[in-house]
Image (tube, rainbow, N blue to C red):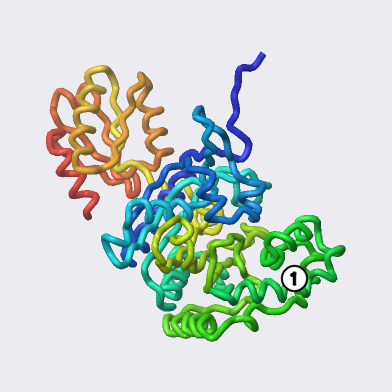
Amino acid sequence: MSNKISSVRGMNDLLPPESAKWHFFESRCRAVLARHGYAEIRTPVVESTALFARGIGEATDIVEKEMYTFLDRGDRSLTMRPEMTASCARAYVEHSLHMREPVTRWFYIAPMFRYERMQTGRYRQFWQVGAEAYGIAEPTIDAEQIAMLHALYLELGVPGLSVSVNSVGAGDDRPRYRQALVDYLSPHRAALCADCQRRLETNPLRILDCKVPTCKTIIAGAPSILDHLGAESRGHFEAVQAALAVLGVPFHVDPSAVRGLDYYTGTVFELVSSSSELGTQNVLAGGGRYDTLIERFGGPAIPAVGWALGIERAILTIPGDAATLAGGPVLYIAALGKAARLEAMRLAAAVRATGAWVEIEHREVGMKAQFKRADKLGARFTLAIGDDELGSGRGQIRDMRGGQQTELALADIATVIARLTAA
C-alpha cells in the first residue's frame, strides 16, 4: 500500500531551476513598478466572503462558481482570495489612506485561488502581479499604466504584443448600454449558450466575453458600448487614446473588451501576445478604472485604476532557458578528507560573506565526482583542497571557462575571488 500524497489538483509545485525564471520575472516587475512610484502591499490570503460578493459582483462567474469558500469555527463565511483588487480596496478604506496622502500607488505579487477549468498557464492556485493607483481621476494615469505594462513585456522580449482598449462607461452610460444590449440579445436567447442565457438576466455585458462560436456570431451584431457613452465618458476615453499616442504605445479600440468583473467603470484594457506558447488563451494582462469601488466598501468617492497579470502565463512567453537564468556558483571548493572539508567550510564562509554563491561538498566522495558536480552546477571557479594545500596554506583556483589557473594563499581567497570576478 502506497502512502504517497500528491499535491491538490491545480495547485502545483514550483521547483528549481524553473523558479529562477519566476525570480527573474518578478525582479523585472519590481524594477518597472518602482520606477513608476508603486510600493508593495501584502494582504491576507483569507478574507470575508462578503468582500468579494460586494466588490466583484454576486452575478459574476467568480463569485457564483469559482471561489474557495468555507465556514470557520465561528461560523463566519471566509474565502481564499480569487483576486486582489477588492482586498486592496478594503485595506485602503480600513486604514483611511485617503487621510494620509492624496495619491496612493500600490503593487502586489501574490497567489490567488479559483476553482475553475484549468487552461494553458492558468491553475487553481495562480500567481498575479498587479498595480493599483488611488486618487487620480485624470485619464493620463490610465495611459501611464497601460504604457507601464507594455514597457515591461517589451523589456522581457515577449513577441507579438498588442493592446486593446475600451470604455464601459460611467454613471448612466452603463445602464443605458445594458438595456440596449438586452433588447438586442433577447430575441436570440434560445441560440445562446446556457451560461449566456443566465447572464442575460444577471450580467449581460459578460456575454460580450463569451468564446462559444454560436454566441460569438450573435455578439458580432450587438450594439457598441461606445455609441452609448455620455460626453464625459467619451471625452475621458478620447484623452486616454491621445495620451497613449504621445507615449508611443500601439493600441486598437475593441468595443467587445469588457473584462469580467462588475467594478469596472470607464477605461478597460488588455495586453495580448501572439506567442504560440499561450494557445488560444493569449491575454497576458488586463485592467481598467473602478471609480466607485472605494465607496462600495464604505469609503469616500476616490477614483482608482489598476491592472493584474498572471505570472504562470507570463513565464510561458519569456524567451530563454530557466537553467541559464538560474546561473551557477562563483566558486566550488572540492575537498578530500575531514580536515580539508572543515577548511573548505571556513573558506566558503569567508567568500560568502562578500555576497558570492559558493558550493562545497559535505559528503565523502572522490575528487572526480566533486569536479563533475562543479561542472554540472556551472561553477565559474573551482578550488581543490587536500593534504598538500592544508600543509602549504596555498592552492590553485581554476577558471572553468578558460582553463587558466591562479595560485593563491588560502587566506586571501575572498580577495582573489573578488578580483577575478571583477575582471
Image check: 371 left or right of 195?
A: left
| Residue 24 visible in this rendered orientation of the protein | no
| Residue 180 visible in this rendered orientation of the protein | yes
Asked if residue 210 is positioned above or below residue 250 in the image, the reply reads above
Where's residue 17, x and y in %? 46, 42
Where's residue 263, x and y in %? 54, 62
Residue 397, quarter of picture: top left
Give the amino acid type for the residue marked by disc 1 in the picture. Answer: Val
Circle 1 sits on which residue? 182
Q: Residue at x 77, y 61 (%)?
A: 212
Q: Secondary structure at mark 1?
A: helix
Residue nearest the observer in this picture, 162 or 18: 162
Q: Residue at x 45, y 73 (%)?
A: 142
Residue 135, quarter of picture: bottom left
Residue nearest the observer in this picture, 357 or 413: 357
Q: Quadrant of the N terminus?
A: top right
Residue 280, quarter of picture: bottom right
Where's residue 44, x and y in %? 42, 42
Image check: 174 left or right of 406?
A: right
Q: Quadrant of the C terminus?
A: bottom left
Q: Residue at x 54, y 44 (%)?
A: 49
Q: Residue at x 28, y 61 (%)?
A: 99
Residue nearest the observer in this picture, 91 or 5: 91
Residue extending farthest right? 190
Residue nearest the observer in this picture, 27 or 178: 178
Question: For the image shown, how many numbered marks are present on the structure?
Answer: 1
Asked if residue 242 is positioned above or below residue 182 in the image, the reply reads below
Where's residue 137, x and y in %? 41, 74
